[in-house]
Image: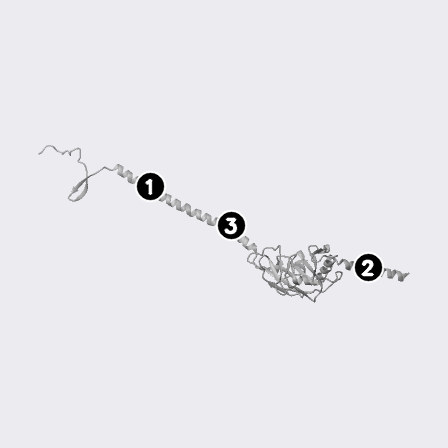
Amino acid sequence: MRVRTNLFMVFSLACLLCVSLSSAQLPHDAVVSARLLDAHLQDWAFKALSGPITGEPYDAQVPTNLTGIKVSAVRLRSGSLRTRGVQSYKEFEIPIGVAESPYVERLVLVYHNLGNWSHTFYPLPGYSYLAPVLGLLAYSGVNLSASELPELDLRASDKPLLVKFPYVEPAPFGALAKCVYFDLHGSVQFDIVLPGNVCSTMQQGHFSIVVESNAPSQAPSDGKNKFMLKIVVPSVVGGVLLLVTLWLLVVGVRRHRKRKSIQQLEGVAHSSETLDIAYIGDTKVPSAFGTRTRAMIENDYLP
């Protein structure tokens, strides 16, 4: 009886363990590496492919403790991928000539959008993310119930794959945005951002747009602009107005003095007698009128 009880307990624990593993719930307190996350995302993505239509993307569900991460899967024929490419799969554009290694008849492209988990799984000291980390990984699509599959080596032969980021935060003033590429072996590479917030790559992996954290920020520029508007501009305007006022005052004083001088000269001209002009030789000299009252001799009688 005790043996049967022990066997029943072991069987129950095994069932609980299987259920726990099948749910693929990541512990909240666990630190999960990016490669382990890729394995879980592959598992969830394949579960979304139930009787899939070739070339049709299917969005997968992730556990609630990883809300914010988006996963999708699309099943393709290898031949069509090489000869036709994929014009648009989420943010990715796959050109003609992309091939996988080793060769498989059917493959599955798994799409990742890590959203607000980008920095958690792909920390990049000295840099800040302007866009979420996007991933594109290829797996064999022969057995859709398989899990923990190794990635295929997906590479472009001629034209590169393009990653078009629709929402990118503006880079701080004076900073230069860069494309960042994380390969499956842990190395990081940087490249220029093409017009339209586009990054290019010749192989699969994870991609984003970043900027150096110690780059000049917009805040100092805004503070300088505010200082100019609040202090410098009013001071300059006030100084100009003061100079104009002083100039008008000087002009007014000069005009007043000139007007007063003219008035004084006119007063003198009106109050003075008019003198006749007499000629002495060829020279003109003023000549006064003759006196009306003749001079009286003090003594009219001669001695």
Q: How many labels does the image show?
A: 3
Q: What residue type is labelled 1?
A: Arg
The image quarter containing residue 178 is: bottom right
Camera-side mark, 1 or 3: 3
Label 3 secondary element: helix
Using residue 124 as the reference point, say whether residue 299 is left or right of it.
left
Kindly report the distance in space between the C-alpha atoms of the residues bearing marks 1 and 2. 114 Å
Which comes sooner in the sequence, label 1 or label 2? 2
Is residue 126 visible in the rendered structure shown here?
A: no
Q: Which amino acid does label 2 sit on?
A: Cys
Q: Which amino acid does label 3 sit on?
A: Leu
Kindly report the distance in space between the C-alpha atoms of the residues bearing marks 2 and 3. 71 Å
Image coordinates for residue 23, horizontal then vertical, percent? 76, 57
Using residue 11 as the reference point, say whether residue 241 is left or right of it.
left
Image coordinates for residue 177, horizontal then vertical, percent? 58, 59
Camera-side mark, 1 or 2: 2
Q: Residue at x 47, y 49 (%)?
A: 235
Which comes sooner in the sequence, label 1 or label 3? 3
Q: Which residue is drawn at 18% across and 43% down?
A: 284
Can you tell which mark lies on residue 217?
none
Q: Mark 2 points at which residue?
A: 15
How many neighbours does mark 1 have within 10 angstroms: few (below 14), some (14-19), or many (20 or more)? Answer: few
Image coordinates for residue 117, horizontal then vertical, percent? 67, 57
Camera-side mark, 2 or 3: 2
Image coordinates for residue 249, horizontal then vertical, percent? 39, 44
Label 1 secondary element: helix
How many neighbours does mark 3 have within 10 angstroms: few (below 14), some (14-19), or many (20 or more)? Answer: few
Q: Name the residue under label 1.
A: 259
Q: Mark 3 points at which residue?
A: 229
Is residue 228 visible in the rendered structure shown here?
A: yes
Label 2 secondary element: helix
Which comes sooner in the sequence, label 2 or label 3? 2
